[in-house]
Amino acid sequence: MRGQRVLVTGASGFLGTRLLAVLREAGAAVAATSRTARASSSEITWYQADLSQPEAAARLFDAARPEVVFHLASLVTGRRGIELVGPAFRANLATSVNVLVEASRAGCRRVVLAGSMEEPEPDEPAGSPYAVAKGAQALYARFFHALYATPVVTARIFMVYGEGQGDVAKVIPYSILEALGGRPPKLSSGARPVDWIHVADVAEGLLALARAAKIEGRRCDLGSGQLVTVREVAERISLMVGGPPPEIGALPDRPLERVRRADVEATAAQTGFRPRIPLAEGLSRTIAWYRAERAAGRL
Ligand SMILES: NC(=O)c1ccc[n+]([C@@H]2O[C@H](COP(=O)([O-])OP(=O)(O)OC[C@H]3O[C@@H](n4cnc5c(N)ncnc54)[C@H](OP(=O)(O)O)[C@@H]3O)[C@@H](O)[C@H]2O)c1
């Protein structure tokens, strides 16, 4: 990636922050977007853009002239409420369509879209406003590749955790912070088996998807290939922190929850990428980070 012009959308977020660090190390010339104005540095040029607006996407591509795009901008929530249908459509699908149009016009070498394990299979209904928008994003990616030869790859990303996750309502940061505070985390049945992947592995995986040859039009899994239930993860955290055990069944289960496991062999064959951080190590690093943030009064 050395010297290449790389654009990261949603770069202020959990994955974006980590990806920026990896791209800087790889020597890329990085442009980044946020809807909030941010100061550029010698290493990163920030652009303020709401990419759900086509004109904003066009202005951004004119200014940044990227060769490679990582599209991470998104409204990331598994909540089911109907009030989220419009916002999820705009943040997760309209932004992607606008980015695909501009990247195709600009002749970008590679576009990597952040997809999700929540995307429905062709024969099943989506389980949330987020899931249906991500499913539609994958359809648009195939369409752009088939009709306009856009070199787009969708990363089907599994459940990400790790240092720096700002949404502390997500189950791992929530369980850690409750345990550190000496309170039992309140959970649903926790019976859902989930494929967890550490944020550092996801950043490396995204980079691999930008580099690999002959994967245009494909969808590649970024997960660990291992299923561990939410309950087991929360119980492990309580033990590691030395906090009270989680209160299982305190909350209702969400409807239409799917069980998916990443096909790590297929991703390795297509890109050479394999995740490296086992769950035990990832949890221990994550707990240490939240402990330090809490001690410093930042959480
Ligand atoms: N975290 C996970 O477990 C996970 C799992 C599977 C897939 N993914 C996917 O990975 C990507 C990154 O996730 P993340 O966890 O890093 O999410 P995040 O922390 O919420 O970051 C996403 C960023 O997107 C930006 N954004 C939202 N709406 C936008 C819009 N209309 N125009 C431009 N920017 C907009 C926001 O930044 P500003 O407020 O600064 O604009 C936000 O910080 C997302 O596409 C997500 O769906 C994440």
Image (cartoon, rainbow, N blue to C red):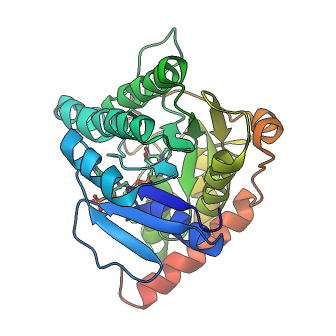
| Residue at 27% over, 45% down | 58
Which part of the image, by quadrant, shows the N terminus?
bottom right
Judged from this view, the residue extending furthest toward the bottom is 296
Please report the residue visible at 75 percent of the width from the left and 58 percent of the height from the top.
278
Residue 227 location in percent, x, y? 69, 40
Quarter-wise, where is residue 24 in the image? bottom right
In the image, taking residue 145 as reference, residue 38 lies left or right, namely left
295 with respect to 259 (left or right): left
Farthest residue, direction left? 83
- The picture places residue 12, in percent across and down from the top left corner, at 37, 65
Residue 235 horizontal/vertical position (percent): 60, 57
Residue 121, percent from left and from top:
54, 17
Q: Which residue is drawn at 36% across and 84% down?
A: 298
Placement of 209 over or under 151, stated as above or below = below
Q: Which of 153 and 172 is in front in this view?
A: 153
Say if 179 sits above or below 188 in the image: below
Q: Toward the viewer: 249 or 168?
A: 168
Question: Which image quarter is the C terminus in?
Answer: bottom left
Quarter occupied by residue 280: bottom right
| As drawn, 260 above or below 69 | above
From the viewer's perspective, tell me whether residue 229 is left or right of residue 40: right
Q: In which quarter of the image is residue 182?
A: bottom left
Whether residue 167 can be seen here: no
Regarding residue 45, the answer to whether it shows in the image is yes
- Number of labels in the image equals 0
- Residue at 55% x, 72% y is 21
